[in-house]
């Protein structure tokens, strides 16, 4: 993040805020994460059409200090006027003056140069502390960095986990060289990696859970930030503990055999 360091581990919020029946459990899970020391929350205006941002707002009320809030705007809000308005709405739902890192959720048809210029203005005005993108492949990042002020992008949030290792071939090194944080979304591949037999085998050897192995694996690279989502408190505890788990060489080799690294460029996948 420009001017600040993004914590390496955070909490995802996709599907939160979708139902009144689960809202208090979601707030409780995020608050538990904060109590356990997590200092990063990822959300988006898309999640429950603002509902997830409201859940985050409730969870951080009275405990916002030192917590990095990342939110994302729709590509169809990327033109100047719409983007300023979307940012206002997100800040209001979150109940904060400044979004720590504000991301373009995915690339759309609107001109990137206008979006970049507006994001830099929002930064100068203190409405956001930094900005970035999501689901940008290496060629998109090249294009972004060639624009005036485009090299101020602080983060790129992408699908990266044991079964989606494509970014290792080119995107991770590209971002690392330019000090762009890579936020790995769906580190559990939306859940299945927490039950995958090859991951379970490694986890049993280490005496931890498969989810912890999958999350710890994403954190092996210094430029990667991992943002698993957990609405259940037991999952939250498991995941927070994973942020300090160090996978030994034997575990890393076993995972490489089961999930080989890419040998050629793979187009960036997206959920
Ligand atoms: P994920 O974090 O890979 O997996 C979440 C699922 O795994 C939930 O069903 C959760 O259950 C379960 N889970 C969590 N911890 C577990 C554990 N310790 N053991 C067993 N199961 C566990 O998937 P995700 O939500 O898609 O990705 C994480 C975050 O990345 C999102 O929430 C969102 O903030 C972000 N994201 C961004 C994009 C983008 O385009 N930029 C796309 C997708 C996701 P419970 O919730 O019931 O605890």
Image: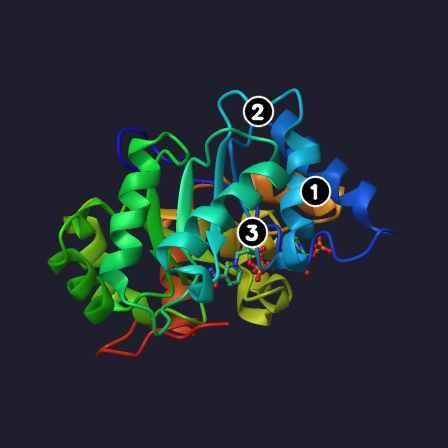
| Label 2, residues with CA under 10 Å away: few <14, some 14-19, many ≥20 | some
Q: Examine the rendered structure and indicate whether residue 194 appears above or below residue 233.
A: below
- Name which residue lies at 59% across and 69% down: 196
Is residue 15 visible in this depiction of the protein? Answer: yes
Q: Pointers 1 and 3 in contact (CB under 8 A)? A: no
Q: Classify the position of ligand 1 by quadrant: top left, top right, bottom left or bottom right.
A: bottom right
Where is residue 248? Give x, y as percent.
Answer: 39, 47
Task: Tell me the element at label 2.
Answer: loop
Pair 2/3: label in front: 2
Q: Examine the rendered structure and indicate whether residue 242 appears above or below residue 75.
A: above
Residue 55 badge: 1
Left or right for 101, reference 2:
right
Q: CA distance from mark 2 to mark 1?
A: 13 Å
Q: Earlier in the sequence, mark 2 or mark 1?
A: 1
Q: CA distance from mark 2 to mark 3?
A: 20 Å
In the image shown, does 248 or 140 lie closer to the viewer?
A: 140
The quarter of the picture where residue 34 lies is top right
**Residue ID for mark 3:** 228
Q: Specify the farthest residue to the front.
A: 81
| Label 1, residues with CA under 10 Å away: few <14, some 14-19, many ≥20 | many
In the image shown, does 137 or 122 lie closer to the viewer?
A: 122
Identify the coloring: rainbow
Q: Examine the rendered structure and indicate whether residue 137 appears above or below residue 184.
A: below
Q: Specify the farthest residue to the right.
A: 21
Q: Pointers 2 and 3 in contact (CB under 8 A)? A: no
- Name which residue lies at 29% across and 79% down: 266
**Residue ID for mark 2:** 64
Is residue 221 visible in this depiction of the protein? Answer: no
Where is residue 114? Give x, y as percent.
Answer: 27, 57
Q: Earlier in the sequence, mark 1 or mark 3?
A: 1
- Name which residue lies at 31% across and 29% down: 4
Task: Tell me the element at label 1.
Answer: helix
């Amino acid at each position: 993040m420009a001017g600040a360091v993004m914590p390496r581990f955070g909490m995802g919020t996709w599907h939160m805020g979708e139902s009144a029946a689960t809202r208090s459990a979601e707030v409780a899970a995020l608050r538990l994460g904060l109590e356990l020391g997590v200092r990063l929350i990822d959300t988006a205006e898309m999640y429950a059409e603002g509902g997830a941002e409201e859940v985050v707002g409730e969870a951080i009320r009275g405990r916002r200090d030192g917590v990095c809030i990342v939110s994302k705007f729709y590509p169809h809000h990327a033109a100047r006027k719409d983007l300023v308005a979307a940012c206002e709405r997100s800040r209001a739902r979150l109940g904060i003056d400044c979004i720590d890192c504000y991301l373009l959720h995915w690339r759309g048809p609107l001109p990137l140069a206008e979006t970049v210029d507006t994001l830099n203005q929002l930064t100068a005005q203190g409405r956001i502390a930094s900005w970035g993108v999501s689901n940008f492949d290496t060629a998109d990042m090249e294009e972004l960095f060639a624009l005036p002020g485009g090299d101020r992008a602080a983060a790129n949030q992408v699908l990266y986990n044991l079964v989606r290792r494509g970014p290792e071939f080119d995107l991770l090194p590209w971002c690392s060289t330019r000090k762009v944080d890579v936020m790995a979304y769906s580190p559990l591949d939306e859940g299945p990696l927490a039950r995958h037999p090859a991951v379970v085998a490694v986890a049993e050897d280490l005496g931890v859970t498969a989810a912890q192995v999958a999350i710890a694996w994403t954190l092996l690279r210094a430029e990667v930030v991992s943002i698993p989502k957990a609405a259940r408190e037991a999952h939250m505890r498991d995941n927070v503990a994973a942020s300090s788990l160090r996978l030994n060489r034997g575990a890393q080799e076993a995972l490489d055999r089961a999930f080989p690294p890419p040998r050629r460029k793979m187009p960036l996948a997206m959920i």
